């Protein structure tokens, strides 16, 4: 029997979060449903694959809220049907100036756990060390203030407390070596200079491990999230059990081209894997693509792409408009997924192997396994690709 489990990152699509809504109001904005926002995306150049309209398996279900148990149950059904064994829920847990926060919790707590529909699927936690964006759509390069959580002992302990009390006790919590899986996505939360980053990072991960054992006699399988190579070595030296990826497909450097071909980007990332493996156990995630331009709905987006050949505006490398990964498809994703899993089976210890896909439903940033609405019906291509690859493992 195939022991190798396949997971996907789950981003909570919901407008039901008072904390996030209050932050949006502070910025003069209001929360918008991201499934609806994605459906309003505009093509910015010839051949641009926008809008991308996802659904929950039926053409009429193209706008939903993950805090709704019915919407969650439909997604659990799809995941199980097409070979997804677990979701890694993006969670927003942390302190700001001593005040604790747990944002966008309803999809996981209410719709997935309390409703009972999630019992059929394993799940784990990825703790993002910054609040979710409250202002969408946005201008290129817009900086939303007050998003990062404090990267201190208080945040580390809060993450452990919530996980240990609410999630690690669940019978369907995903485990590696019998230990609850917990990944941390620091992003830009730690200081950018190397010495400060190393000190802050090591102290943070040490606190997570030490506090979990001291208070709950639990040794979490702690995973550092790599998005750009510059942080990998520092993360690996911080006491984590392993590294993995998140949006580890495009070239994020400011000098990178705004349009990047999927297969070329994937092979460039693939060439980095052996070096990452030397640092630590490394399980690469595989992405279905990247294109966050649906999060930009303004005249400046069209102006920037008016002459894509020269790209004369300052949009190069500015989130969320660029980079955009082009030429992504279920076929090339399937090839990339096969190569990713071959690396995992070859380079990762057997009892630490799993597959991880970015993502189940990052609909406004394009990486999603969910079925697409097309002029001819629905496209289940990415889900079918997962099922085929899993059968071959």
Image (tube, rainbow, N blue to C red):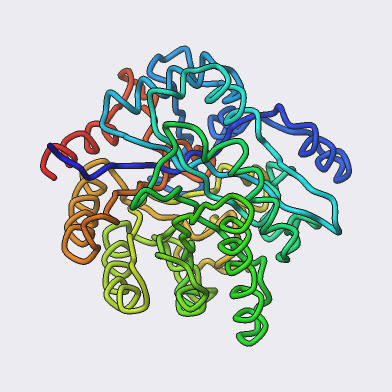
Q: Residue at x 23, y 31 (%)?
A: 384
Q: Which residue sits at x=18%, y=58%?
A: 345
Residue shown at 87% from the left, 41% from the top: 28
Q: Quadrant of residue 15?
A: top right
83 relative to 175, above or below: above
* 64 in relation to 332, above or below: above
Identified at 35% across, 74% down, the residue is 276
**Image side of residue 4 versus residue 18, left or right:** left
Q: Position of residue 227 (x, y in %)?
A: 48, 64
Residue 119: x percent and y percent? 43, 23
Q: Return the residue nearer the eye: 267 or 9.
A: 9
**Quarter occupied by the C terminus:** top left
Residue 42 visible here: no
The spot of residue 71 in percent (x, y) is 51, 18
Number of numbered discs on residues: 0
Q: Position of residue 30 (x, y in %)?
A: 79, 34
- Quadrant in which the N terminus appears: top left
Left or right of residue 246: residue 271: left
């Amino acid at each position: 029997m195939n022991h190798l489990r396949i997971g996907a990152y789950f981003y909570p699509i919901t407008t039901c979060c008072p904390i996030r809504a209050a932050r949006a109001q502070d910025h003069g904005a209001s929360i918008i449903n991201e499934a609806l926002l994605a459906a309003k995306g505009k093509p910015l150049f010839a051949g641009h694959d926008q809008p991308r309209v996802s659904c929950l398996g039926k053409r009429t279900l193209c706008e939903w809220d993950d805090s709704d148990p019915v919407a969650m149950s439909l997604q659990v059904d799809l995941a199980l049907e097409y070979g997804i064994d677990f979701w890694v829920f993006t969670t927003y847990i942390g302190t700001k100036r001593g005040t604790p926060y747990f944002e966008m919790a309803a999809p996981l707590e209410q719709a997935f756990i309390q409703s009972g529909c999630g019992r059929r699927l394993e799940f784990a936690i990825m703790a993002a060390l910054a609040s979710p964006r409250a202002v969408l759509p946005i201008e290129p390069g817009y900086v939303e203030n007050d998003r990062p959580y404090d990267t201190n002992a208080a945040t580390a302990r809060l993450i452990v407390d919530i996980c240990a009390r609410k999630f690690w006790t669940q019978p369907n919590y995903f485990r590696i070596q019998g230990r609850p899986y917990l990944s941390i996505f620091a992003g830009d939360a730690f200081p950018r200079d190397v010495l400060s980053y190393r000190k802050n990072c090591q102290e943070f991960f040490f606190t997570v491990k030490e506090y979990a054992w001291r208070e709950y006699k639990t040794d979490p399988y702690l995973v550092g999230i790599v998005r750009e190579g510059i942080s990998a070595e520092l993360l690996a030296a911080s006491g984590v059990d392993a590294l993995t990826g998140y949006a580890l497909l495009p070239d994020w450097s400011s000098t990178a081209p705004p349009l990047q071909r999927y297969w070329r980007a994937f092979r460039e990332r693939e060439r980095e894997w052996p070096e990452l493996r030397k640092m630590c156990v490394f399980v690469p995630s595989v992405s279905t693509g990247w294109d966050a331009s649906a999060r930009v709905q303004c005249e400046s987006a069209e102006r920037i792409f008016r002459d894509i050949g020269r790209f004369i505006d300052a949009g190069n490398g500015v989130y969320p408009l660029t980079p955009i990964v082009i030429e992504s498809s279920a076929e090339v994703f399937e090839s990339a997924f096969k190569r990713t899993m071959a690396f995992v089976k070859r380079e990762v210890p057997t009892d630490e192997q799993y597959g991880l896909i970015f993502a189940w439903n990052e609909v406004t940033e394009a990486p999603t396994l969910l079925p697409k609405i097309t002029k001819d019906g629905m496209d289940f291509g990415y889900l079918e690709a997962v099922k085929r690859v899993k059968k071959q493992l």
